[in-house]
Amino acid sequence: MNHLYGIAFVMCAAAAFATLDTATKYVSVAVPFAVVMWFRFGFQVLTTSIWLVRTQGTWRLSSVHIRLQIYRGVLLTGSSILAFFSLKLIPVSDFTALMMLTPLLMTVVAALALKERISLLRWLLVLMGFIGAMVIIRPGHEAFTWGSLLPLILVLTSAGFQMLTYKLAKLDSAAVTHAYTGWIGFAMSSVILPFVLQSSFVAWSSASSVLGVSAWTLASLLLLIAVFATIGHSFLILGYARAPVAVLTPYLYAQIPFAVLGGWLVFAHQLDGWTLLGIAIIAISGVLGTWLTARERHVDLRVILDN
């Protein structure tokens, strides 16, 4: 039963992340990244600190492995900044599909860093996933820009973040891990904010007119980003604490249809044939890669479903 709860948490995280990405793309036209990051991590710090006080009687953080918590916080902050600029340049659906290369990249990380033996078929699936990415990006196509490669850099930071999330889920509580990440992200964005403060004030004053919304609506959108970022990462941590990566990874691909829906509703994005093909290649290679990994490690799926 714990594994089913883990799957449910990951599905909720996928929906939350798709909503987060859609809202981020919408405000990125007019709001500087430092403002969005400061608001997003500030909300996370506030909510997790309140939760820690209510459940543990203190907001002070105690971790089994502080160094890993710091690494995770830095990686998530860097990933959030890369995601902001990536979403400014490409549709939400394309961005999400490229992010789904992360589980495939973790296969490469396992081979290089963990000295894990990787079968030829799994290497072929990794290659297949990156072919799908190239189909989506299409270097040489008239719509291609070098900024379209930003999501590929983001995949690298995201792979490290995911591995640390899974490891820390076994060491610290979800609230502690989430609080550490929030404080680190808030501290880093607070350092950046003064350097863009003047332009941020100008951008904020003109953002409402650029987006065609009121200042209150714009503030509500920033709150939406903060809420769904906090909810999404909380669900992800809770999911990893209840089920193995091999079980949960296929369900992360549910974020793609959620992202397609968000892009269509908010931006009227319609996928062309090549993009659909690239998304399908990435999704198929990712799911097959996860299944093959579980099979090679002798994971009995019937036992998993019975637990």
Image (spheres, rainbow, N blue to C red):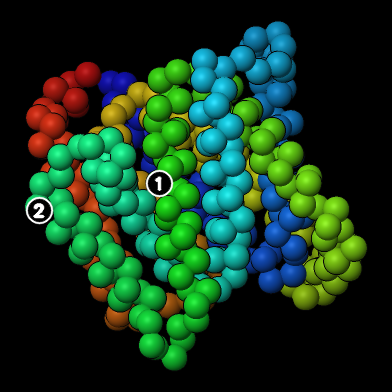
Badge 2 amino acid: Leu
| Label 2 to label 1: alpha-carbon separation | 21 Å
The residue pinned by badge 1 equals 159
Residue 2 figure quarter: top left
197 vs 186, left or right, is: right
101 vs 234, left or right, is: left
Place of residue 98 in the rendered image (x, y in percent of width and height, measured from the top left)? 39, 62
Place of residue 85 in the rendered image (x, y in percent of width and height, measured from the top left)? 60, 65
Q: Earlier in the sequence, mark 2 or mark 1?
A: 2
40 vs 175, left or right, is: right
Front residue of 23/146: it is 146
Q: Are marks 2 and 1 in contact (CB under 8 Å)?
A: no
Q: Is residue 160 above or below residue 139?
A: above
Badge 1 amino acid: Ala
Q: Which labelled disc corresponds to residue 180? A: none
Q: Is residue 156 visible?
A: yes
Q: Is residue 34 above or below residue 1?
A: below
State the SS at label 2. helix
Q: Which labelled disc corresponds to residue 121? A: 2
State the SS at label 1. helix
Count of numbered circles in the view = 2
Residue 53 figure quarter: top right
Q: Is residue 84 above or below residue 184?
A: below
User: Which residue lies at the image location 47% right of the left edge and 49% below the top edge?
Assistant: 157
Give the quarter of the figure containing the C terminus: top left
